[in-house]
Amino acid sequence: MENNESNEKNVDKIQDEIKSLKKTLSEIQSECRHTKFTVKYIQELKIPKKICDKCDLDIGYASDQELKDNGFM
């Protein structure tokens, strides 16, 4: 029984850490100027998107020229 309680505490601690890290990441991404990006294929969406090189935020769809420049067309 003690092992289950210990596991529950560990799970709670890990979830709190994840929540804190996500908040920190969000703050970093909101302050980033997104001055340099890479066009990457996003498997889950099955489309190429612009991803900031500094903060890893999805900053939108690539233009036709950006797609051509990166070998997607």
Image (tube, grey):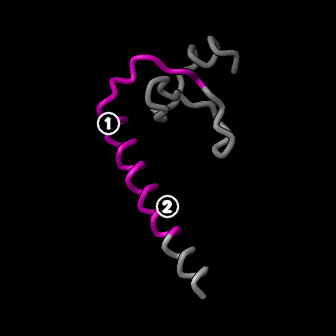
Which residue is denoted by mark 2 in the rendering?
14
Query: 1 or 67, which lies in front?
Result: 1
Q: Is residue 62 above or below residue 25?
A: above
Q: How far is disc 2 from disc 1 in space, using C-alphas?
A: 24 Å
SS category of the residue bearing label 2: helix
Q: Amino acid at mark 1?
A: Ser
Assess disc 2: are there few (<14), some (14-19) or many (≥20) residues with their C-alpha within 10 Å of its C-alpha: few
Assess disc 1: are there few (<14), some (14-19) or many (≥20) residues with their C-alpha within 10 Å of its C-alpha: few
Residue 61, horizontal then vertical, whole percent: 52, 30
User: What stretch of residues is rendered in magenta?
Assistant: 10-39
Q: Residue at x 37, y 35 (%)?
A: 29
Which residue is denoted by mark 1 in the rendering?
30
Task: Please report whichever mark, 2 or 1, sits nearer to the chain's N-terminal start.
Answer: 2
SS category of the residue bearing label 1: helix
Drawn side of residue 32 relative to residue 42, left or right: left
Residue 18, horizontal then vertical, whole percent: 46, 55
Q: Amino acid at mark 2?
A: Ile
Residue 54, horizontal then vertical, whole percent: 45, 24
Q: Residue at x 38, y 53 (%)?
A: 20
Drawn side of residue 12 relative to residue 68, left or right: left
As for residue 16 lying within the magenta part, the answer is yes
